[in-house]
Image (tube, rainbow, N blue to C red):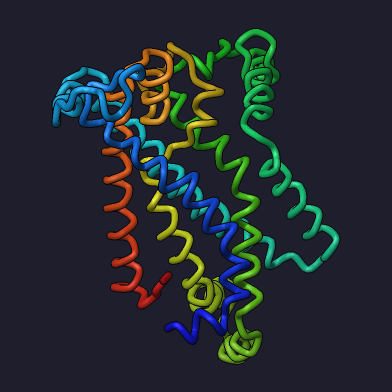
Amino acid sequence: MKKGLVKHRYLHLMIMPAFLLVFVYQYIPMFGMVMAFQNYIPAKGFFGSEWVGLDNFIYTFSLPGTMRVFWNTVFIALMKIVVGLIAPICTALLLNEVTQRFFKRGVQTIIYLPHFLSWTILSGILIDILSPSEGIVNQLIQWLGFKPIFFLGNNDLFPYLLVVTNEWKEFGFSTIIYLAALTSINPALYEAAVMDGAGRLRQTWHITLPGMRPIIVLLATLSMSGILNAGFEQVFNLYNPLVYQSGDIIDTYVYRMGILSAQYSNATAVGMLKSIISCIFISGSYYLAYRFARYRIF
């Protein structure tokens, strides 16, 4: 081992800045999790605050809105994961059939552009577009003879609005990944399928999708780690008190509890539980990826 360290010392030096960055910003802050077991008072600090055991967890989950927040998070995140897998795969398959290179590249660029915009910018655009009085969407609805819809204030529509707008922003990035996966498929397989009389649908089902399976399994597995990440930045910029019932997620709940209400210990308890559940989900998804697809990520 010592010889290996000496032999690869320059590689270790190259990775040291990244290691220090992760250690300082990811691991050292983990010490703050002790607040979940304390009646934390900033003036007293970690060592002076009173230890209360699991009281913060019991109190937080006795609140009427806590379980609703967990349900909203799982529901929204699951919809994003499912749509985030289906839409890019379908788009990649359709673009793969396009023979005109200029048109194909143009479509890729157009659908990829929203990925580079932050939710702060996109939320402002969406608020204007979906405005109940002057938004272009409601103007079209009124032109068709229907009443305007308050999209950002409707509890029934808001979760689905989050899913659709998130996919509009991100599916172009995933599509490019799947298009790259398509280039690794041997063209001879398609030639053999044509000789056997297989049409485009059968070629897609028996050659294209199996060839894409490793990257599909990889992205699906990695997305499971975010089962409790429904998108803080997006929700924070789009939601309001009218849609707390269906749009409030764990991250926004922790933000209001910890930052706005200064309930640091209770907010830490919720955040800690979220991390534990996410760790269980990602571990399970890694096992399933190997169990059913014989695919290892690590």
Residue drawn at point x = 40 percent, y = 22 percent: 156
Q: Is residue 5 left or right of residue 133?
A: left
Indicate left or right for 289 with 266 as reference.
right
Residue 222 appears left or right of 118:
left
Query: Does 144 sit above or below residue 116?
Result: above
Find residue 168 and report its image quarter: top right
Q: Is residue 95 above or below residue 259?
A: below
| Placement of the N terminus among the 4 image quadrants | bottom left
The residue under the point 49% across, 78% down is 206
Q: Position of residue 190 (x, y in %)?
A: 62, 84
x, y percent for residue 129: 67, 21
- One can see residue 181 in this view: yes
x and y percent of residue 7 in the render? Answer: 56, 84
Q: Quick check: 222 left or right of 15?
A: left
Q: Quadrant of residue 57?
A: top left
Q: Nearer the viewer, residue 265 or 273?
A: 265
Which of 187/215 is in front? 215
Which residue is located at x 85 percent, y 61 percent?
A: 102
Residue 247, can we see it? no
